[in-house]
Image (spheres, rainbow, N blue to C red):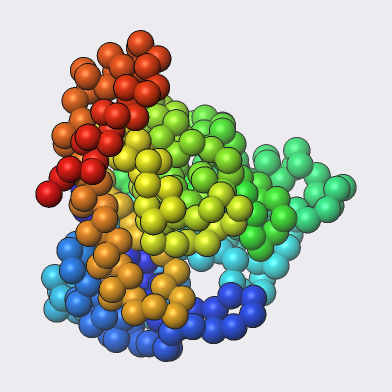
Amino acid sequence: MKYSVITGFLGRLQDRFTEYQNDRSLGEKFELASRIEGLDGLEVCYPADFADLKLLEDLLDKYSLDVSSLNVNLKKERRWANGSLTSLDEKIRQQAVNVLNKAMDLAPQIGCEVVTVCFLIDGHDYPFQVDYRRAWRYLVEGVREVCTHRDDVKLSIEYKMSEPVAHTIVGNVGKALYLCEEVGKDNVGVTLDLGHALYAGENPAESACLLAEKGRLFLVHINDNYRNWDWDLIPGFVNFWDYIEVFFYLREYGYQAWMSLDVFPKNIDPVEVFGRSIEFARNIERIVQRISSEEIFQLINERNVPAIFSYLQDKSLNIG
């Protein structure tokens, strides 16, 4: 696996109530990233990180960091307040398409083949607030137009149940897969955020299997929560066994793309938070290496849950 950090988590952070961390320039974010043990690259944010493309390219070269993916923000600006690709205003919908097309053009320039986007502003808060049929049609048409614009770049759709709207238009793995099938392009896929899967009440390993079976698993974001909100906690600190299972199935499918850290450091040193997150993920990789596919599937076929539990304990608690 290769590990990256989303640049947005390396500067000033805020929730609905307060602010955390210091405001940092792009150069300061890169310097901070350079001190994260085990980091291979960054997931850069568009348009925030692209005010000076030459500077971004120079910083990537200076710190020898790769780009895992280009994350497009289609929610922060006021023009997106009533939706991006699903807006009733045709001009706004076209602007959203243009932003995504620009991101698709920029990605190869920085050595990146995946553009990821989460349609967080597209959805509804109340019954009868939107025409679901029209909104879905607009979404499919917009995504298809972007994928057609550059078929050599992958567009990866990240799903999430809510925030800032109560019900986002792509809230779970099933809707994400359905969107891909509706779009009908080979270069559209899904970003599996393990925290979003947990929050949606999914089993992350099962979600990974569904996506991988259809060849739609383009990117993985790792973090953790208590299944009640998208807390973006340190991965595996809460749902340890889920991480072993999802990493096991990623191995089964030969997933060798990026793991991007989508973790909210809050009031903790971000270098330590991300460094320990990578350390944990590497340890999970080591545990999974010890799990024999033949042995574990034999136990699964026997439906011998106590034996499975003992087997996993033996492989995970003695990795010294």
- How far across and how far down the image is residue 101, in percent? 45, 57
Viewer can see residue 258: yes
- How far across and how far down the image is residue 261, in percent? 35, 60
The reply, left or right, for residue 169 in relation to residue 217 is right
Reply above or below: 34 against 302: below
Which residue is depicted at the point 64% across and 80% down? 17
> Please, which residue is most extreme toward the right here?
128
Reply above or below: 289 against 152: above
Q: Nearer the viewer, residue 115 or 15?
A: 15
Which residue is depicted at the point 21% across and 64% down? 39
Count of marks, rendered view: 0
- How far across and how far down the image is residue 36, in percent? 22, 72
- How far across and how far down the image is residue 129, in percent? 84, 52
> Please, which residue is most extreme toward the top here?
302
Q: Nearer the viewer, residue 162 or 224?
A: 224
The reply, left or right, for residue 153 in relation to residue 171 is left
Write down the quadrant of residue 106 in the picture: bottom left
Viewer can see residue 56: no
The reply, left or right, for residue 211 in relation to residue 107 is right
Write down the quadrant of residue 276 in the picture: bottom left
Which residue is depicted at the point 37% across and 66% down? 6
Which residue is depicted at the point 29% across and 29% down? 310
